[in-house]
């Protein structure tokens, strides 16, 4: 075993034991890893790597007078003996590491270490000791919850893993995740979480966008048609099945149409609420949604050069909804008057 020894100070971070020390960036890079979320398997929890952030730090840390706060790791439990921790006198400890193994999970330093594999500058570090994956994820979320550029969808995904009762605490998140994970959903594996993407599939809206649209849907429909979170998930699923059936090209081509972009998602979820509220006490099914959409949606220009072009923000959503509702109203009047 190629052995590395890091002499550390034992300490505490609130109520959790930690190791404090310093080592070369090259060494810390060699024995650590970033547990980036794999959206296909659901394993991992960190955001996808941002090369520019990492290059910026590489340039900065080599300047005269540069410094950084401690890099934060978790020394993960192993069964293969890849590391040993030996206590020394006066609160010190020796961490023995097999240099062929990556034993430190990068809780908060992925982008600082990303491009430092060849740099011998010493950097300070703090490592938790044998947190489980859930605890590690929770700490990552707390540290990075307000971080600029961190995907809110990724933090929502963390919440979903950590919530005891998602249906009660975050029903809109339960619905959005159902759309992403249900194989019969047109959104199956097509919502961006902020981790490593599923290969071969075009990106449309983010989990956060759909979640926010669903939240409005739940608020508007609750007085007329109260639904459990599970019923709401099925209803929203059925609505989007209808959208994909009525507008197959617009749903399948996110680069050319706005149906699966933010403005389209918000406007269509508001329209879904309209359809639900038109029949109080009755939950529409796919056939009902399809019939409601078929009379007008194919005649509306959903393209990136159409009337929704350039609309954004709350005002943009209101205008998009006005345009969609007006198109539906005119189509219904035309049918009514032959």
Image (spheres, rainbow, N blue to C red):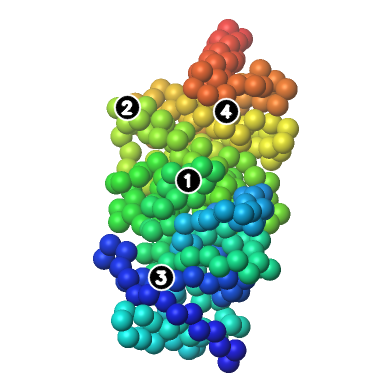
Quote the CA–CA distance across marks 1 and 3: 24 Å
Quote the CA–CA distance across marks 1 and 4: 25 Å
Q: Say which label, 2 or 4, has the lower sequence index.
A: 2
Residue pictured at 42% horizontal, 60% vertical: 137
Quadrant assignment for the N terminus: bottom right
How would you rate the neighbour count of disc 1 (Cα within 10 Å): few for under 14, some for 14-19, many for 20 or more? few
Q: Secondary structure at mark 1?
A: loop
Instruction: Answer whether residue 62 is visible to the viewer in this image.
Output: yes
Whether residues under marks 1 and 3 lie with C-beta atoms below 8 angstroms apart, the answer is: no
- x, y (%) of residue 177? 47, 49
Tag 4 residue: 263
Quote the CA–CA distance across marks 2 and 3: 58 Å
Q: Secondary structure at mark 3?
A: strand
Q: Nearer the viewer, residue 115 or 282?
A: 115
Q: Is residue 266 above or below residue 322?
A: below
Tag 3 residue: 20
Left or right, residue 49 beside residue 150: right
Tag 1 residue: 147
Tag 2 residue: 224
Q: Secondary structure at mark 2?
A: loop
For marks 3 and 4, give the one nearer the viewer: 3
Quote the CA–CA distance across marks 1 and 2: 39 Å
Q: Nearer the viewer, residue 84 or 296?
A: 84
Residue pictured at 44% horizontal, 74% vertical: 75
Q: Say which label, 1 or 2, has the lower sequence index.
A: 1
Quote the CA–CA distance across marks 2 and 4: 25 Å
Residue pictured at 70% horizontal, 26% vertical: 304
Which quadrant of the structure image shows residue 14?
bottom left
């Amino acid at each position: 075993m190629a052995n590395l020894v890091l002499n550390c100070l034992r300490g505490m971070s609130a109520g959790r034991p930690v190791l404090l020390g310093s080592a070369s960036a090259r060494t810390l890079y060699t024995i650590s890893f970033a547990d980036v979320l794999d959206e296909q398997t659901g394993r991992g929890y960190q955001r996808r790597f941002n090369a520019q952030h990492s290059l910026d730090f590489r340039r900065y840390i080599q300047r005269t007078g540069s410094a950084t706060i401690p890099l934060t790791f978790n020394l993960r439990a192993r069964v293969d003996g890849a590391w040993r921790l030996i206590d020394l006198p006066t609160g010190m400890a020796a961490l023995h590491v097999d240099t062929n193994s990556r034993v430190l999970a990068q809780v908060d330093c992925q982008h600082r270490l990303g491009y430092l594999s060849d740099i011998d500058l010493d950097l300070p570090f703090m490592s938790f000791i044998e947190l489980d994956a859930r605890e590690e994820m929770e700490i990552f979320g707390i540290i990075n919850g307000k971080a600029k550029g961190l995907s809110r969808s990724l933090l929502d995904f963390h919440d979903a893993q950590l919530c005891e009762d998602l249906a009660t605490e975050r029903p809109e998140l339960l619905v959005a995740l159902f759309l992403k994970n249900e194989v019969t959903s047109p959104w199956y594996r097509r919502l961006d979480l902020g981790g490593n993407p599923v290969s071969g599939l075009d990106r449309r809206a983010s989990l956060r966008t759909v979640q926010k649209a669903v939240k409005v849907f739940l608020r508007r429909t609750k007085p007329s048609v109260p639904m459990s979170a599970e019923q709401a998930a099925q209803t929203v699923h059925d609505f989007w099945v209808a959208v994909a059936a009525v507008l197959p090209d617009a749903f399948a081509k996110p680069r050319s149409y706005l149906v699966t972009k933010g403005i389209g998602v918000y406007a269509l979820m508001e329209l879904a609420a309209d359809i639900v509220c038109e029949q109080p006490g009755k939950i529409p099914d796919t056939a009902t949604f399809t019939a409601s959409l078929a009379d007008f949606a194919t005649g509306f220009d959903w393209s990136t050069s159409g009337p929704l072009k350039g609309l954004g923000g709350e005002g943009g959503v209101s205008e998009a909804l006005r345009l969609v509702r007006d198109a539906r109203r005119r189509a219904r009047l035309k049918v009514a008057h032959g």
